[in-house]
Image (tube, grey):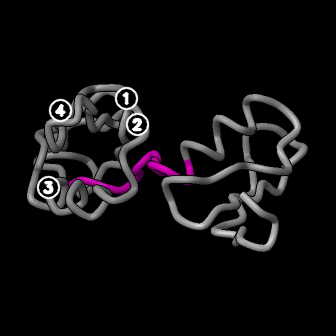
Amino acid sequence: MAESSKNVVKVIRCIVCPTGCSIKVIGKDDSDVTFEGYHCNRGLEYAEQEFREPKRILTTTMKVEDGTLPLIPVRTNEPLLKAKLNDALKIIAQKQIKAPIKMGDVLIENILDMGINIIASRNLEKNND
């Protein structure tokens, strides 16, 4: 590919280590790209993942029935496709879990059929009133 035909598609800041490389994704389209500016293979892997199929850990809250609090913080046990975050949030918003809950309990199994679970981020006791 000639230098004049290259376009910077995106710049990604690597978060794998404290170096924080600024990685340029260069190419004419999304299918034919090169990565420049990374200092290790982990940085290259991160940039490729972030460019082609970005993922995030989802953190939010879920409604609780009979708990000492009305909501419990929850998260995914693995990163979820960024494009699916809103779909997952809609499902979580419709659910309500009964107390007591232990940190790490699976509250929603296999959300969006992606093999990813929604788990409790803290303990929550049952309300004894």
Q: Tell me the residue that label 3 is attached to.
A: 91
Report if residue 58 lies within the magenta region. yes
Q: Earlier in the sequence, mark 4 or mark 2?
A: 4
Q: For mark 1, what is the residue?
A: 103
Q: What amino acid type should be assigned to the residue bearing mark 1?
A: Met
Residue labelled with disc 4: 110
Tell me if 31 is positioned left or right of 33 in this view.
left
The CA span between labels 3 and 4 is 12 Å
* x then y, percent, for residue 101: 25, 32
46 vs 5, nearest the viewer: 5
Compared with 103, 9 (above or below) is: below
Q: Percent x, y for residue 3?
A: 81, 66
Numbered tag placed on residue 122 in the rendering: 2
- Check disc 2 and give the amino acid type: Arg
SS class, disc 4: strand
Report how far apart the C-alphas of labels 2 and 3 lie in the structure.
20 Å
Check if residue 25 falls in the magenta segment.
Answer: no
Q: Which is nearer the N-term, disc 2 or disc 3? A: 3
User: Which dot, 4 or 1, sits closer to the camera?
Assistant: 4
Q: Earlier in the sequence, mark 3 or mark 4?
A: 3
Amino acid of disc 3: Ile
Q: CA distance from mark 4 to mark 2?
A: 20 Å
Under circle 1, the secondary element is: loop
Q: Which residues are magenta?
A: 50-62
